[in-house]
Structure formats: structure tokens, C-alpha cells
Image: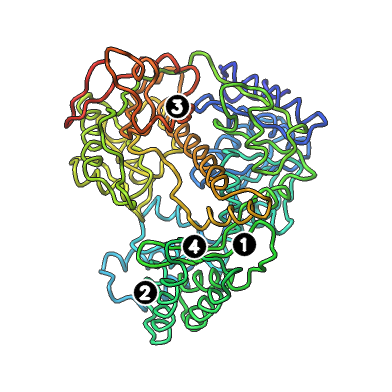
């Protein structure tokens, strides 16, 4: 049996792009190159396509690790791989691997019940039932509903005594031929030098650098400190935080950041706060202590890392910053066959090796040693586009303040999509955006902070005209045939990071370059991340060959096609979007004509002008 044969066992009529991916990966696994990049458009079934050849390899005795960006994607990948493994002549065990933070701690639940007097009888009954579960939090919530407390307060930690379910999982994954885990777990393995695999597959591989950077970085914000002070009110902590803010107000000033390397007083202030938290026993306090310790103990000579105090909302924050996740990631694939798979690995419109160079640089890989593959079906689904009027105000005013006029327009766009009928998925960059839409539009399913997306999706599926607004469904959410509309509320630019900008500038200055170049490099990174997230969001609408979806984009920073912007009869222009033309690269190539035929949604409450 070859990879295409196995694919046909599970999907009797595999699509031609799936066959091509499976065949090319099978050749790669048998060849001499160490790395392969697969850019496969969302919705064509890439999990089954890469899963078939790696399942065959596992059946032949090679150990496989499949890494996903989120736990939701992990579950989907595990299900697809189990179907493939079950169709093999020699079945292979497939196991999920999750960290302690995903498991319930009966002991911590018991302590929480003893110490919290603000929980009502229903909440206490649910938590008492959870005490007897001891397994995955998601599994418990799937059958009983969302728990009424923060996961950080009830999950396993390394100091918990009872870890039965976690230990059983470790035994199961140790014996499995295919292990599915998250990027966070994969990065942790790489740091520890424990990547026990012959073949590593990174699904949504372009999210791996951010996972590595997040692992190497630490942050303590004014909100973090305020939350700790509310639960652990001590004179020592209050005094240490107040002294830090008084010093930071002078040291940071208009520069927005000051580096520990340049001002040792930053480390002394961090150590004073950490020492005041020594006796605080909550999970959150422990996280803050560890982050402050990382700040204090960072060696100034560490390459491409730094510690800074940065201006933040409500005060100042401590940051440990990392600029080269490739150093960590190289440990994840050195010495084994590695597949990076995503819909947005390649830059630009070409499919050759050069298109993958920007991504390969971020993971520290040698482009000449990589096999490139870009697959996009010519006919697969259909899209229509409704774009923002150029007179719409930007989402934020100067200083980062939200613009109510934009929020009104975005809400009007959601209502216009609702009026046309069918399910509407509105994708938000943040929970704050969800709140703004929910204030203005009634009858929607609003996914709030702390709630399970799975529960909101069940509610969304139950009605043919439901509207779901969420920041958690840009990737990994599979709703084939269910969506009539996708509304992109804002372009998902990463939030600004003055500390990171200053850190990169410092490194470039040592190489004879200036701060403006540093800003340009970071802007490029942020733009690529925004294009990646946009492409993923658009992909939610076309999961099958017959799916048809209308895409509404409320943000006026997303560019119009030239057919509209340069039409002399309209005098529309691009407005602010003239600086963001590259965002149009998120539109799949097969929908280029549909994008060129986009309509402009009028600047009124729900009105839409014809093209």
C-alpha cells in the first residue's frame, strides 16, 4: 500500500491536490533532504494528505510527532490520524500529548472550594463533581459545561500530589507510533533536547516561531500585579509596586522603554516585587514570580535577548524579549525528517523555493536543504467580497483609544450580513471587539473571555441564521457547508511592542544600522503575521468544494482592488490602505477575480452600495 492508496481507504474520492501532497511527501520521506515545506490552501484536506504518508512511515517502525498550534487543531489532527492508522494493514497507535495545564487537579479544586466564599451552590456542586474527575478539563467541560473559575486555579502543577491521568497519558504516548501535541509542547521538548521522533510534522508551521518566542519570553503587566495585590494584600507588596512605578515614571519617560542592561535599577525593582511575593501561594502569583525571576536573572550578554521595562496601560510592565526563535527551533528538527505544513507558509504569489525563504529564516532552516511544495486547487468553493468604504474612520484614534464611530460601522456591517440570511461568523482580533459588537447588535452568540469556544460553536450550529462573534476561530475551526458570511471586524495586526522595537534597534545599532531600519523590520514581521491570520480567517468560509461565502471586511486599512481604487468615475482611492496593499495577499489566488469584483459597503447603518 502506498500513501495515495491509504488516502483512498479513508477518503474514497480524494481530491487531486490531496493526492499530490501525499505522493510528494512520500517521496520526501524516502529521499535525502531533511526539510519539506508544504503550502496547501485551507479546506483541501491537508491533514489527511500529510497524514497518509506519515502513518505508513509509522507502520514501518518510524516514530512520528505531529505538532499543532492549538488544542482544537490537535483534536482534529488526532481524529484524522486515527482514521488513517485504523485503515493500515498493520495498525498504529495514535496518542494525544498535553501538558499539565490541561488536566484537573482534585487537590487544587478542594483548596479552592475551601478558600472561596463567593461561589454559589450550583458552582460548588459542579466543582465537587470535578474533584472526582481528575482528567482533562476539556473532557469534563464537554459533558458538564464550563467550570465557573479560571483554569489556572484548578489545573495540575508540577507540585500537585495526584497526577494519575497525566501519568497515564505519558505511558500511552511513550508506546504510541504517532504522537499529536501542541507547538508549545514541541518547543519545550526542543529546549530540553527531548524530541523523540524520526519524523516531525508541524501543522500550521508558520505559528511555530511565535510559540518559540512566547516560550523564551516573559511579561508582568500592571494588570498582573493588580490581580496579585487583590488576592495577596501585603504592605510589602504595595510598597514595592508603588516604588517601582515611581522609578519607572522617571526612567522610561518618553522613550517608552528602558533596558535592564542600561539601568541596573530595573532589576532591583523587579527583585523587590518578587521578594514581596515569596509567601503568596496562588498559581497566578507563582507565574508572576517566575517571570520576574527571568527578568532579574537574564544575562545581559545573552545573544538576541534582552530585559526591558516598558510603558503600558495603567503603568509599566517588565518584559523579557527574544528576537531569534530559530535558535530554539533548530533543536526541534535537527537530525530528523521535518515537515512544515500550512496555508500561509509561502510569501507572494510564486510557488518556488524563494517564496519559502522568509519563513525558513524565522525557523533557522537552510533554504537550499528544503523541498518546496505549493498546492492550490483551481476550483474549490466560491467567495464574494464586501469591503469598507474609504470614508470609514480607522479603528483607533491617536494614543490607541478605540474609535466609537468605527465600532458603529463594524456593527452595522454585521447587521447587514445578518439581513442577507444564513450563518455569520464574525472574527475579532480581541475580546474587546466582541464586547463592542455585543453592545450594538442583539441576538448574537458572543464568545466572551473565559468561555469555551466549543460551547459557543454548538450554539452557533443549532440555528441556520446564527451569528457568532469570537476572537478564537481564525484557525482550526471547521464548519463545512455552514457559513454564508464571514465578517472580519479588524485586520489582526499584532499589538505594538515598544520594548521589542527598542531591543531590535539596539542590536542593529551595534551593526551600524539605525532605529528606523529596526522599525521597518518589525513592521514587516507584523504585516506577515497579519496576512497569515487573515488568510486563515478567510479559509474558515471555504471548507468544501461547494462552499460559497461572502466575506465582509470592516477595516478601511484593508485595500480595495485596483478596479475600484483607480476607477476615475469613482475617485475612491485607497485612503489609509495605500500603506497596506500587501494585505490583499491573504486572498487565495483562485479568488482573485472575485476580489477584483468586490463591492463597497456604504458608510451607513447596514447600507451597501453596488459595485
Q: Position of residue 530 (x, y in %)?
A: 47, 38
Q: Nearer the viewer, mark 2 or mark 4?
A: 4
Q: Nearer the viewer, mark 2 or mark 3?
A: 3
Q: For mark 3, does the 10 Å Cα neighbourhood hold few (<14), some (14 to 19), or many (20 or more) residues? A: some
For label 2, the SS is helix
Which disc number belongs to residue 257? 4
- The secondary element bearing badge 1 is classed as helix
Name the residue located 53 percent from the left edge and 39 percent from the top edge: 524
Q: Which residue position is annotated with label 2?
A: 113
Percent coordinates x, y for residue 180 in the rendering: 61, 45
Judging by the rendered image, the residue that carries numbered circle 3 is 584
Residue 145 visible in the shown view: no
| First in residue order: circle 1 vs circle 3 | 1
Task: Tell me the crowding category of disc 4: few under 14, some 14 to 19, or many 20 or more residues within 10 angstroms, Cα based.
Answer: many
**Which mark is first along the chain, 4 or 3?**
4
Up the image or down, 245 lies above or below 371; here it is: below
Location of the C terminus (image quadrant)? top left
Residue lying furthest right:
32
- Residue 167, numbered label: 1
Above or below — where is 119 with respect to 506? below
Q: Are marks 2 and 3 in contact (CB under 8 Å)?
A: no
- Residue found at x 26% / y 45%: 403
Q: Is residue 482 left or right of residue 259?
A: left
Residue 487, by quadrant, is top left
Give neighbour class at mark 1: few <14, some 14-19, many 20+ (Cα, 10 Å). few
Amino acid at each position: 500500500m502506498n500513501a495515495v492508496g491509504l488516502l483512498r481507504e479513508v477518503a474514497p474520492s480524494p481530491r487531486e491536490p490531496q493526492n499530490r501532497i501525499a505522493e510528494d511527501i512520500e517521496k520526501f520521506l524516502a529521499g535525502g533532504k531533511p526539510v519539506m515545506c508544504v503550502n496547501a490552501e485551507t479546506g483541501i484536506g491537508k491533514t489527511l494528505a500529510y497524514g497518509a504518508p506519515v502513518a505508513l512511515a509509522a507502520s514501518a517502525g518510524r516514530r512520528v510527532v505531529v505538532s499543532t498550534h492549538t488544542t482544537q487543531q490537535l483534536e482534529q489532527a488526532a481524529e484524522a490520524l486515527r482514521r488513517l492508522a485504523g485503515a493500515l494493514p498493520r495498525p498504529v497507535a495514535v496518542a494525544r500529548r498535553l501538558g499539565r495545564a490541561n488536566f484537573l487537579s482534585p487537590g487544587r479544586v478542594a483548596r479552592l472550594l475551601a478558600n472561596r466564599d463567593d461561589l454559589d451552590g450550583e458552582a460548588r456542586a459542579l466543582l465537587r463533581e470535578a474533584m472526582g474527575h481528575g482528567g482533562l478539563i476539556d473532557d469534563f467541560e464537554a459533558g458538564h459545561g464550563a467550570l465557573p473559575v479560571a483554569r489556572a486555579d484548578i489545573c495540575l502543577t508540577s507540585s500537585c500530589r495526584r497526577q494519575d491521568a497525566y501519568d497515564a497519558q505519558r505511558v500511552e504516548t511513550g508506546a504510541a507510533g504517532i504522537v499529536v501535541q501542541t507547538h508549545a509542547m514541541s518547543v519545550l521538548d526542543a529546549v530540553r533536547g527531548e524530541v523523540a521522533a524520526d519524523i516531525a510534522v508541524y501543522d500550521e508551521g508558520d505559528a511555530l516561531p511565535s510559540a518559540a518566542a512566547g516560550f523564551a519570553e516573559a511579561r508582568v503587566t500592571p494588570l498582573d500585579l493588580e490581580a496579585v495585590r487583590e488576592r495577596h494584600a501585603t504592605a510589602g507588596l504595595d510598597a514595592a509596586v508603588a516604588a517601582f512605578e515611581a522609578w519607572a515614571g522617571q526612567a522610561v519617560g518618553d522613550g517608552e522603554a528602558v533596558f535592564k542592561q542600561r539601568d541596573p535599577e530595573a532589576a532591583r525593582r523587579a527583585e523587590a516585587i518578587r521578594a514581596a511575593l515569596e509567601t503568596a501561594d496562588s498559581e497566578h502569583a507563582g507565574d508572576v514570580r517566575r517571570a520576574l525571576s527571568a527578568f532579574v536573572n537574564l544575562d545581559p550578554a545573552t545573544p538576541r535577548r534582552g530585559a526591558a521595562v516598558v510603558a503600558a496601560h495603567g503603568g509599566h510592565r517588565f518584559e523579557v524579549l527574544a528576537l531569534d526563535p530559530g535558535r530554539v527551533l533548530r533543536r526541534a528538527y535537527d537530525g530528523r525528517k521535518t515537515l512544515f505544513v500550512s496555508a500561509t507558509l509561502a510569501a507572494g504569489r510564486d510557488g518556488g523555493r524563494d517564496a519559502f525563504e522568509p519563513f525558513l529564516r524565522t525557523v533557522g532552516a537552510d533554504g537550499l536543504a528544503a523541498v518546496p511544495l505549493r498546492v492550490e486547487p483551481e476550483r474549490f468553493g466560491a467567495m464574494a467580497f464586501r469591503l469598507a468604504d474609504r470614508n470609514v474612520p480607522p479603528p483607533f484614534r491617536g494614543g490607541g483609544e478605540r474609535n466609537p464611530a468605527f465600532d458603529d460601522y463594524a456593527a452595522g456591517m454585521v447587521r447587514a450580513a445578518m439581513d442577507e440570511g444564513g450563518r455569520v461568523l464574525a472574527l475579532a482580533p480581541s475580546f474587546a471587539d466582541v464586547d463592542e459588537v455585543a453592545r450594538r447588535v442583539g441576538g448574537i452568540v458572543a464568545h466572551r473571555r473565559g468561555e469555551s469556544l466549543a460551547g459557543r460553536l454548538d450554539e452557533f450550529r443549532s440555528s441556520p441564521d446564527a451569528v457568532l462573534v469570537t476572537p478564537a476561530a481564525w484557525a482550526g475551526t471547521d464548519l463545512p457547508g455552514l457559513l454564508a458570511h464571514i465578517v472580519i471586524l479588524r485586520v489582526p495586526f499584532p499589538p505594538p511592542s515598544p520594548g521589542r522595537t527598542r531591543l531590535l534597534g539596539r542590536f542593529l545599532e551595534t551593526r551600524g544600522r539605525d532605529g528606523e531600519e529596526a522599525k521597518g523590520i518589525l513592521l514587516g514581521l507584523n504585516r506577515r503575521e497579519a496576512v497569515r491570520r487573515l488568510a486563515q480567517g478567510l479559509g474558515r468560509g471555504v471548507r468544501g468544494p461547494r462552499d460559497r461565502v461572502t466575506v465582509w471586511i470592516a477595516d478601511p486599512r484593508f485595500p480595495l482592488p485596483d478596479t475600484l481604487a483607480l476607477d476615475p468615475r469613482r475617485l475612491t482611492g485607497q485612503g489609509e490602505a495605500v500603506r497596506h496593499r500587501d494585505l490583499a495577499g491573504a486572498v487565495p489566488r483562485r479568488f482573485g477575480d472575485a476580489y477584483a469584483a468586490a463591492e463597497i459597503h456604504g458608510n451607513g447603518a447596514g447600507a451597501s452600495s453596488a459595485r
